[in-house]
Amino acid sequence: MVTKIVLSPCLIELMSEHESEKCEMEHLTHLQSILDFLCESSVEFDYYQNAPYIPDALPHPPISRYHYHHISCIELYKKILSKICYEDYIDLTKYIPSELVTLYDYPEHSETKESFLRYITYLVLSKREFLLFIGLANKNKPHPFIFSVTEDFQIDTIPISEPEVDCSGQIASIIVNQTADELFPNKHYCSSLNTNFLKERHTGDRKALIIKIGDEVASRNGYIKNDYLSMLNSRKQRSMRAVYSKLRKSPTYLSLDFESGGFEVFDKNGLHLGQYSFDGARTKVPAPDTHKLYFS
């Protein structure tokens, strides 16, 4: 079943009618980057009552107050329209609006708040998979967001602000894996993650950063954490190891490189294939004499 996309009011509307042109441009650029990412992903927008991206929707959110930004807005709507599922119209009148009980700033006089909260109720009660995208105004709010759907039922979800560098583990579910037999079939989805690592590697907890980005990159490329091999190799080599595996025609294994970041890559027999950065580029040639992967 295709994952549904929810655009929060702070992403689709301006936060205030008094926003500067600079803030508005940042808003539009942020929305543009999210939609560019989603257009290459396996997702859908639902066709529901007062959906803010339906051309004839009333009310229509004020994405821009500046007439020379209208062309950009038209292009944004085109991107959304290409992903709308028109098969079923969803009548939200029978769904009570949920309540977002965690910290969240709605736009002033929001025109999309009620339909947004009703839509969340519909998605939860219908047991549909969805991802929630938020704007810059709520980017640093505490996560997860908690929605109260009924008097005795709450759900929590981790919102996404920047999908290119998001490390919540949710992006892998919407990536179209076109060439699964490559070592890093979705490396183009990981270039920004690698750039972030290079910027932040000398600040804060380096090991925690490597684990966070390594987990995300492995997931986006179809690998899963192999707890058994991670524990075995940590014990054998007397230092922390995090190993990921992928079952392809020929199984492949990734081991996090805690010294320089990236991965040491091994084949099904544990033969070292080289060192790779988080964007899937090989940075060092194979060194089987010094790099080992144990299976028993």
Image (tube, rainbow, N blue to C red):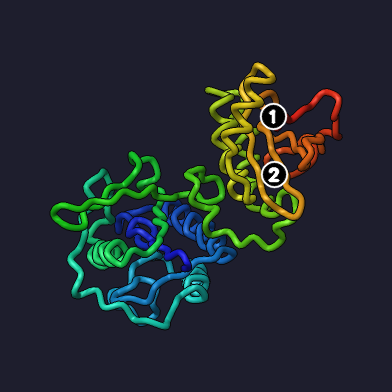
The answer to which image quadrant residue 211 occupies is top right
Residue found at the far left of this picture: 151
At label 2, the amino acid type is Asp
Q: Residue at x 67, y 54 (%)?
A: 186
Is 207 situated above or below 131? above
Label annotation for residue 296: 1
> In screen coordinates, is 248 left or right of 51?
right
Query: Is label 1 in a helix, a strand or a loop?
Result: loop
At label 1, the amino acid type is Ser
| Rendering coords of residue 204 (x, y %) | 53, 23
Residue 73 in view here: no
Query: Is label 2 in a helix, a strand or a loop?
Result: loop
Label annotation for residue 162: none
Circle nearer the N terminus (2, 1):
2
In contact (CB < 8 Å): disc 2 and disc 1: no
> In screen coordinates, is 160 left or right of 270?
left
> In screen coordinates, is 210 left or right of 121?
right
| Rendering coords of residue 65 (x, y %) | 38, 65
| Rendering coords of residue 132 (x, y %) | 39, 56
Which residue, given by chain and number where applicable, does mark 2 sit on? Answer: 279
Is 96 situated above or below 188? below
Badge 1: how crowded within 10 Å, few (<14), some, or many (20+)?
few
Which image quarter holds the C terminus? top right
Badge 2: how crowded within 10 Å, few (<14), some, or many (20+)?
some
Is 157 situated above or below 65? above
Q: Which residue is drawn at 59% across and 44% down?
A: 224
Q: Residue at x 65, y 43 (%)?
A: 245
| Rendering coords of residue 271 (x, y %) | 81, 35
Q: Which of marks 2 and 1 is in front?
A: 1
